[in-house]
Image (spheres, rainbow, N blue to C red):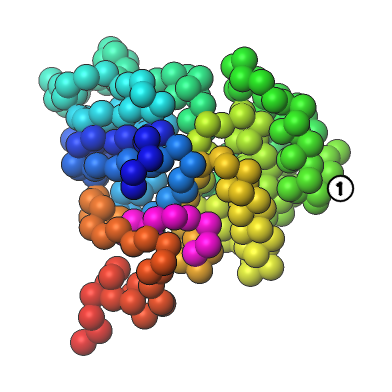
Amino acid sequence: MTETPLLELRGLGGGYPPISVFRNIDLSVGMHESVGFFGPNGHGKTTLLKTVAGLIDPWEGDIIFAGNRLNAEGRMRARTSKNLNYDLFRKRRIRAETVVNAGLIYVMQGNLLFPEMTVEEVLDIAPLAAKGRTGITAMRQRVDDLFPRLQERRGSKIRYLSGGERQMVSIAVGLLALPQMLILDEPTLGLSPKLRIELAQAIRKIRDSRVPLIIVDQNIEFLTGLVDRLFLFDHGSITREIDSGSMPKHAEIMTMMFGEAN
């Protein structure tokens, strides 16, 4: 990659004290680039994304976005007592508000929305996260065009939506924050093949609108065509990089993730 990076991770490490989940992550994502992560479940992909999004403190390393450091410098101190809730007294090394204000928007897996609010109410409050960035009216129209199903369901409470519809709302909320970069964590988790295709088409349109993406998904076919580079994340590390012209077949993916069959 030769273009100026929008997001840089330098020697990033983290986890849930005292357990290290990922370490020594180096990654650069360009201004108009989209990248994807895949790998076995439980190997740290979501923990990495939560750290970049400011939900979990990094232990060490740097998170640089649009040329600005988002986290405190240096290494995180170890806990001094096993019996003390250290998190009550420790100063945060990164704050989610700082990340959101910078325009780095994370759409978590699991459709974590307000169940008693309607689709329209959720979409109405989503732009509050844009923090002065301009273009809300145009983005709302784009969201309506991307997800016409939500227009049909705008008066329905979130709790009554299907899993695919909730995922559409989640992505719409992320877009209405006017992201400089959008992170999608397992957007196809639990979706039917039909909804997966529908969602892939919407995400492709988001990418074509020049919103840089980071996408984590187990479905490599879903990622193919959406990203410029693909990274295998295994045991807390990036172990392989694949460019868009060399996307692997299913058998190759299984070998990467689980090794050769006996």
- Residue 147 shows up from this direction: yes
Residue at image location 56% in from the left, 58% down from the top: 188
In the rendered structure, the answer to whether residue 244 lies left or right of residue 114 reads left
Residue bearing the label numbered 1: 152
Depth check: give the residue in front, 91 or 223.
223
What residue appears at the point 29 percent right and 36 percent down from the top-left corner? 9
* Left or right: 187 in relation to 33: right
Residue 74 is situated, as x and y percent measured from the top left of the image, at 17, 21
Query: Percent position (x, y) of residue 139?
Result: 71, 33
Q: Which residues are magenta?
A: 224-232
Left or right placement of residue 120 versus residue 63 in this view: right
Percent across and percent down for residue 211 are 56, 40
The residue at the point 33 percent across, 77 percent down is: 252
- Tell me the amino acid under the disc marked 1: Glu
Task: Establish if 214 lies above or below 127.
Answer: below
Question: Quarter of the image containing the C terminus?
Answer: bottom left
Residue 260 to residue 235: above or below: below
Query: Circle 1: is it few (<14), some (14-19), or many (20+) Cα within 10 Å?
Result: few
